[in-house]
Amino acid sequence: NKITHKTEFGAVVTNIKSEGKLIEEMDKMSKRLHDVHKNTKDESFLIEETAPLPIAELLVGILADSQFGLTLTLGSGGINTEIFKDTVSLLLPTSAEDIEDSLKTLLIYPQMRGFRGTTKVNISKLSQELLNVTEFFQQNREKYYSLEINPLFLYSDNICAIDAVFEAYN
């Protein structure tokens, strides 16, 4: 069973500061997930260092469509994905310039540009990094039919994929 919204199922815990707390939270999480998904046998946990707060959060999706080919979707990420439904789509292949122009249409663009004097995202570098992701996907098109990164944390000069899912052909 796939859990689409991990937070809603209690499958994400943050701010764990000791080994004892980690073990306690893993036990609680295991029980919560088994209560929801009775047949779950997987006892694997992904433990990561907490990323610093970003300037903005982006959704990045690539989907192989039989009619249109590959499509790149960009939008407001994290919980804002469902709240704002703020997305733009481009057919692949594309260019860094087209990606940059598309980013400018999003509601979160002012936040990326340093709203009210906050730190700015390097939009040119971000656009190039997103182009690199699309090129990787295109080169591996026979292996994967979709990719979703949500959220992609945006910082002034770098990015960090907090949650990413590739769906592969069988």
Image (cartoon, rainbow, N blue to C red):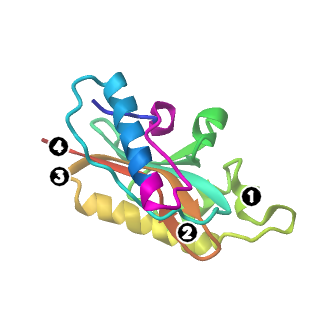
Magenta segment boundaries in residue numbering: 6-21
Residue highlighted by disc 2: 126
- Nearer the observer: mark 2 or 1; the answer is 1
Q: Residues under labels 3 and 2: Cα distance? A: 26 Å
Side of 21 relative to 116 (left or right): left
Q: What residue type is disc 3 on? A: Glu
Side of 81 relative to 13 (left or right): right
Compared with 120, 141 (above or below) is above
Residue highlighted by disc 1: 111
Q: What residue type is disc 4 on? A: Tyr
Compared with 100, 36 (above or below) is above
Residue highlighted by disc 3: 142
Percent of width and height locating residue 4: 41, 34
Please report whichever mark, 3 or 2, sits nearer to the chain's N-terminal start.
2
What mark, if any, has residue 169 been given in the picture?
4
Q: What residue type is disc 1 on? A: Gln
Q: Residue at x 24, y 63 (%)?
A: 139
Q: Residues under labels 3 and 1: Cα distance? A: 36 Å
Please report whichever mark, 2 or 1, sits nearer to the chain's N-terminal start.
1
Q: Residues within 10 Å of mark 4 (few under 14, many from 20)?
A: few
The image quadrant of residue 132 is bottom left
Percent of width and height locating residue 54: 64, 62
Tell me whether circle 2 and circle 4 mark residues in contact (CB < 8 Å): no
Q: Residue at x 38, y 45 (%)?
A: 26
Q: Residues within 10 Å of mark 2 (few under 14, many from 20)?
A: many
Q: Residues under labels 1 and 4: Cα distance? A: 37 Å
Q: Residue 115 colored magenta?
A: no
Q: Secondary structure at mark 4?
A: loop
Please report whichever mark, 1 or 4, sits nearer to the chain's N-terminal start.
1
Q: What residue type is disc 2 on? A: Leu
